[in-house]
Image: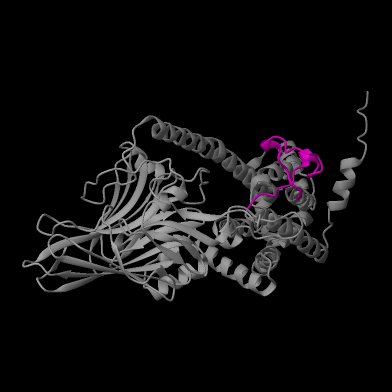
Amino acid sequence: MENNRNYFVAIALSVLILVAWQFLYVNPRMEKDRIAAEKAQQTQQAQPQQGGQQAAPGQALPGGAVPGESREQAVAKSARVAIDTPALSGSINLTGARFDDLKLKGYRETVDPKSPVITLFSPAETADGYFTEIGYIGSDATGSMPGPQTVWTLSGGDKLTPATPVTLTYTNDKGITFARTISVDDRYMFQVVDSIKNDSAAPVSLSSYGRVTRFNKPTTPSIYVLHEGFIGVAGENGLQEVGYSKVEDDQPVEPGKSTGGWLGITDKYWAATIVPPQETPFDIRFSHFADGRPRYQSDYKSDAITVAPGQSAEVKNLVFAGAKEVPVVDNYEVAYAIPNFDKLIDWGWFYFITKPMFKMMDFFFRLFGNFGIAILITTIVVKLIFFPLANKQYASMANMKKVQPKMEELKKKFGDDRMGLQQAMMQLYKDEKINPLAGCWPILIQIPVFFALYKVIYVTIEMRHAPFFGWIRDLSAPDPTTIVNLFGLLPFDGPAFLHLGIWPIVMGVTMFLQMRMNPTPPDPTQAMLFTWMPLVFTFMLASFPAGLVIYWAWNNTLSITQQGIIMKRQGVKIELFDNLKGMFAKKPKPAE
């Protein structure tokens, strides 16, 4: 029973780790974020507002925007250029040439097709202000530089579409003219190309800056498997992932000077990033400001460039604002040579497994048109890949059962002589050509695959609102049914901790049947784990994405079938039916 003991100990430790993580880390973090959100709201209501502007790197800016206006009011009060693409709608604010009005046409807030489309950017004057801005920092010699208060003139085009770029111009008091051409593709990438002409009598030195700023953060705290917050790639310093709480508690995070890279703010499914000029060194900064109105800012400041009198210079920025669709993000990385841009999607530690698994699931989705079916077929492929290992596992378990009578004889023979028993058992394993650890390795190897699949279902936008069949309308959300209201027959939901849907119950039943394929351990502690483990996992997975629960239930079903076939070939008795009969058999009364 050493193999069974190792198996149950591994399960118990896994459950203990998950439960401890939930109560010691996830719950306190959620409570901390809730309290911080309440304090931020109270601060906004109690303190005089200093506007929707904030300092760009090295530049102090006046205030003036007061949050509390409706989105429609804030959009209507400034001159704008409309944006209309197959994926986006909104406008560019001519004050600051700011991207602060953007909606995602292809995504809605809920599975209801009549629900509002997703709003990504909103003006700074609103409670949910969120925007991206490109500007410049100069000196007294350069005169006023394009910044948050600069009013640009529309000099070319009247609507930004994939076929029609627009041109904005601004000339300052020193005779320096900025001509900004903005173009957009059919998805989520904007190109901002500035032509800077120096008509003054002296050379000018100026630095470009870009910032992504938001005045709130997600109301639902992310779990530990997903990063939400500041993100970027800082040249040789690589990927930077900084949480909101990090900059709230400490000073701004500054990864250092970079040549090549990008920066921004990411949510679970959406992101806003800036790709600065890749040939000019720049500094990245992730900050939190609490001077009147809390806000979060991801910004960069480039090294200065010099434009001689009568000469021109060109500065090119890219702005990504939209949904983190895997093929779109991957294509941008290649098309624009953006280093590690695919890391905008949080593939996790098992990147080398997670992304190929998504590719496989996406292939089956495009073939069958249903991500639920894609999950089922992917499970079969994974089972086939691990088929040799699983065969060894089940064959080892079958062989262990064969020698069980001999092991019992050795226990009786050696009694309390543990050393002698261990030596005899090792000799028995050697004689019978049994590796007692063979049953553990396949389980350990498949753990990364399970977490990789979890990541795919949880973080990829392709799974968002993806239906299966029947009541499962969103594979990325928990099963909406619950046993408390008889799976929707009664008109109430019941407490959240009792939420237990149909698919988690199916998963629990399949796990119970899989464990009953083996004899009940004689040790009382192991027997208790053997009995209660399926129930514990049923409640644990009730809040997991339905797609993951469906995968687990299907995987259990395939494992039961595979194990049954291998045990039959090995000539080992399948204990399932005897175990089920034993559960309902009347126990004999103890002798008086």
Locate residue 463: give its quadrant: bottom right
In this rendering, position of residue 109 left or right of residue 39: right
Q: Would you say residue 289 is visible in this rendering? A: yes
Locate residue 259: give its quadrant: bottom left
Q: Where 409 falls versus 35 (above or below)?
A: below
Residue 244: % across, % down: 40, 44
Q: In terms of depth relative to the viewer, which is nearer, 445 or 160?
A: 160
Q: Would you say residue 347 is visible in this rendering? A: no
Q: In terms of depth relative to the viewer, which is nearer, 439 or 549?
A: 549
Q: Residue placed at 71% from the left, 56% from the top?
A: 550
Q: Residue placed at 80% from the left, 61% from the top?
A: 564
Residue 159: % across, % down: 41, 68
State whether the magenta stretch is mostly helix, strand or loop. loop
Q: Residue placed at 31% from the left, 56% from the top?
A: 95
Q: In terms of depth relative to the viewer, which is nearer, 411 or 440?
A: 440
Residue sitting farthest toward the left: 201
Residue 433: % across, % down: 69, 62
Residue 43: % across, % down: 39, 32
In this rendering, position of residue 232 left or right of residue 536: left
Q: How many marks?
A: 0
Where does the C terminus fall, quadrant-wise? top right
Q: What range is drawn magenta here?
A: 477-502
Task: Decide whether residue 478 is among the magenta residues.
Answer: yes
In this rendering, position of residue 148 left or right of residue 25: left
